[in-house]
Image: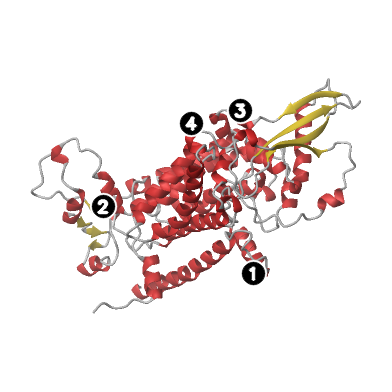
Amino acid sequence: MKEKRSWSAFFEAWLFDGCALQTCAFLRVGFGLLVLVYGLVWLRDAHFWFSNQGVVSVETITANQPATMWSIFFWVEPNPGFVTICLTIMLLNAVLLTLGCFGQLQAAFIFFWLVSFQNRNSLIGDGEDSVFRLFAFFLIWMPLDRCYSVTRLLEPVASRIPRCSEAAWPIRLVQIQMAIIYLSAACSKMLSPTWQDGSAVYYVYQMQDNFGRGPLPAFLMETEWLIRLTTWGTMVVEACLPFLLFLSRTRRVGIVLGVVLHLSMEYSMHLFLFQWIMMLGLLAFTKPEDFAWFRRWIPKQNPYQADPLPQRRRLALPAPKTSDGPLKMEEIEEWGGCRTYEDDFIDVEPEDSFPR
Amino acid sequence: MDQEQDKIRIWKRRAVLCAIPAFLLVSGIDALPDPIAHQGPLRSVQIRTGQILGIWQGPWSMYAKPSVKYLWLSADFYDEQGIKRDTWNSPYWQEVSGVKKFVHFRHMNYYIRMCSPLHREAAADFAHYMAAQRETELTGELKVELFANNLELTLPAEGEILDPDEFVWVTESRQLYDPWADVDLEALAEPPPITWPRAKQP
């Protein structure tokens, strides 16, 4: 008889289940690259926005902000040289994060810089800055360097033991945050008369400074029922996404819908990096089997390389020894409850595999 | 040794089990849309906690209230004798290329925010900055008068989808900074109305 699991047990399993190391690595690389672009755009006008010779003084900013907001530039005078140095360090942190060199430490530094710069001049920020800051905070707790990283490459092979005790809760934080954004946006829209009556998208379309990036067929904005359908459709998709993404059966549909929503907005609107950071957030819902599923669609060039990856993984053995000697059976069993992925195994070619 | 490690692991788990619901509570309340959010002492504590930890976010309006408003700034530069020496206009974003919009995205946000009555001091700072940039030995000290100009579409009532020819546009030009006005420093120093969390338009 199937044992009934309590909600607390389910919640605990959800948080402490094995963590998808590939997903963490992709989040790390994606976030590092986005911070790099984000920081380079800041660097271009760094003195203008953040220095004491710029457009807004620290006194003006602090007078408009609660005392609980903090920034390094409230403690150290932000002369142009200091601002440039801080921003350069942030960019360096972003490069190191992308490469996977002490990723968690780099994420912590990036979080510190983002809070400092965003609070130094809050007049230039918007929603996407919050997403960047929050993602940096979540990345601090993730096992970022366990695959596709410089740290991993530099580790002696013998010490590359699988550490599948890594819990999934940092990734869950990203997922919760994404759900909060979609739900909050959907609620705000449901309360707005223009979204209720279905005319909102038409008026958003009239915002020519933000809208009108890519050419759209004229009938899209001339047909009334199509306008109302787009408006309500957007609202419904945003409201449904959190549920679709969290239910295992609809997870992939949710990811695809989310990506389509953000790509269409990226095509039609000028919103800097907002759509890209949101799509990166959707990546947190992926699982290793999704990458395997995706890989199946990539055409294989050499038939002799066609041995399917899952089979190879099944034949692979956990790293046979640690610094303390060979692994005992109990230790291997201890990992049983966790999910282990490709990177946690040493590659052993099956005997009957094709010659390469 | 193993027992020690087990103990640490159990405490870590407990910490996470407490922290995650706390995060959910803080972020969930923070992201509530303004009409729903209850402005009580609990919310104030939650906002402060988020600000100290650096994880505040505010509601995600995402064009919930579309406002079609084209906004640009203009500045007149006057010398010590009060003679107009120069004028400046911020870009008219509708006519700017996509690449330039990407690079100057922060400028767009900044000009919009500066026009808010909440940021009067920021407008004064900007005027001083502009004056300092243009001042030369020839011009001497300059004074800058700053204006916010906008062209706003009046949204029709009850969800009508109008033809662009039927749109009603309203223009407005308003002084943001007057260099000759006696600045009431005490009034400026007064804390402004609650500005956090602000609704965002990414």
Asked if residue A79 can be seen in this view, the reply is: no
Which amino acid, by three-letter code, is at mark 1? Answer: Leu
Percent of width and height locating residue B23: 52, 64
Circle 1 residue: B42
For the residue labelled by badge 1, is the local secondary structure a helix, a strand or a loop? helix
Q: Is residue B107 left or right of residue A242?
A: right
Residue pointed to by mark 2: A342
- As measured in the structure, the alpha-carbon distance from the residue carrying label 3 to the one carrying label 1 is 46 Å
Name the residue furthest top. B138
Say if mark 3 contacts mark 2, CB within 8 Å.
no
Q: Residues within 10 Å of mark 2 (few under 14, many from 20)?
A: some
User: Which circle, 3 or 2, is nearer the viewer?
Assistant: 3
Residue mark closest to the camera, 2 vs 1: 1
The residue pinned by badge 3 equals: B95
Q: Locate residue B171, reporting x and y percent.
A: 74, 36
**What amino acid does circle 2 point to?**
Glu
- With B164 as the anchor, is A10 left or right in this view? left
Residue A215 — which label? 4
Q: Secondary structure at mark 2?
A: helix
| Whole-number angstrom distance, CA of label 3 to CA of label 2 | 51 Å
Separation of residues labelled 2 and 1 (CA atoms) = 46 Å
